[in-house]
Image (cartoon, grey):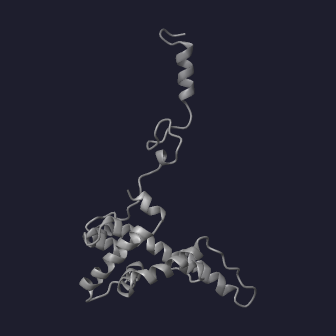
Amino acid sequence: MAAGVTRRRLKARRDRRGRPRKATARHRATTVAGRAAPPDLGTDELRRHRLAATTQSGLPDDLLGVLYGRAVIDLEQYTAGRDFSDVVRLVRLGLGLTEASPAGAWRNILSAASAGRATIVDVAYPGADSARRALIRFRRELGRASWAAVNAAADNIWPIGEFPRFVMNLRPGLDYLAVRLPLSSRRVAR
């Protein structure tokens, strides 16, 4: 053997061969999060559009994102609005109403294809009944103006010409929902 080269060093060289390590992987990490690529924030044009609408390129450019980005509502209200949108979406799916998504489009295609033959069995969405009962309770307790404002925000409807009154009705509704909605995103947002 050459000088300075021992069996131990030869074994170490041999063990290092094989598949190279990923540059984004953490050493000795066993989770996928340690090896995950950075999140995709969209194209430059989309980020510029979001930045112009919300003053933050990471927020969605819908109604709640714009109001939160412009500091019209705070983080608790923004999170409550997102949670309420999830409850409304769950109720719509539970009632058989399709959503504007690829899953909803496929459901429409499959139901149209089987219209002459057998019908597709509706999928029971877990939690849809309790979400429907929660919506009925919220509607009763929020009051008509706040309920209409929160629904408009959940449906991403911007009432043109009624902005000050809309925000005055939306804030108490979102404050109420921030306390009453026991969904997971309230725990994650902190």
* Residue 27 in picture, x, y percent from top left: 47, 36
Q: Quadrant of residue 18?
A: top right
The reply to whether residue 62 is in sight is: no
**Above or below, 8 relative to 64:** above
The reply to whether residue 56 is in sight is: yes
* Residue 8 in picture, x, y percent from top left: 55, 16
Instruction: Looking at this view, name the residue that lies furthest to the right.
Output: 118
Q: Quadrant of residue 67?
A: bottom left
Give the side of residue 161 with respect to residue 153, left or right: left
Give the quadrant of the N terminus: top right
* Residue 124 in picture, x, y percent from top left: 65, 75
Q: Residue at x 44, y 44 (%)?
A: 24
**Above or below, 174 relative to 116:** above
Of 16 and 99, the residue lying toward us: 99
Q: Residue at x 52, y 17 (%)?
A: 9
Of 30 and 74, the residue lying toward us: 74
Q: Quadrant of residue 163?
A: bottom left
Give the side of residue 162 with respect to residue 131, left or right: left
* Residue 87 in picture, x, y percent from top left: 50, 74
Give the quadrant of the C terminus: bottom left
Q: Residue at x 67, y 85 (%)?
A: 113
Instruction: Looking at this view, name the residue that lies furthest to the front.
Output: 141
Of 11 and 24, the residue lying toward us: 24
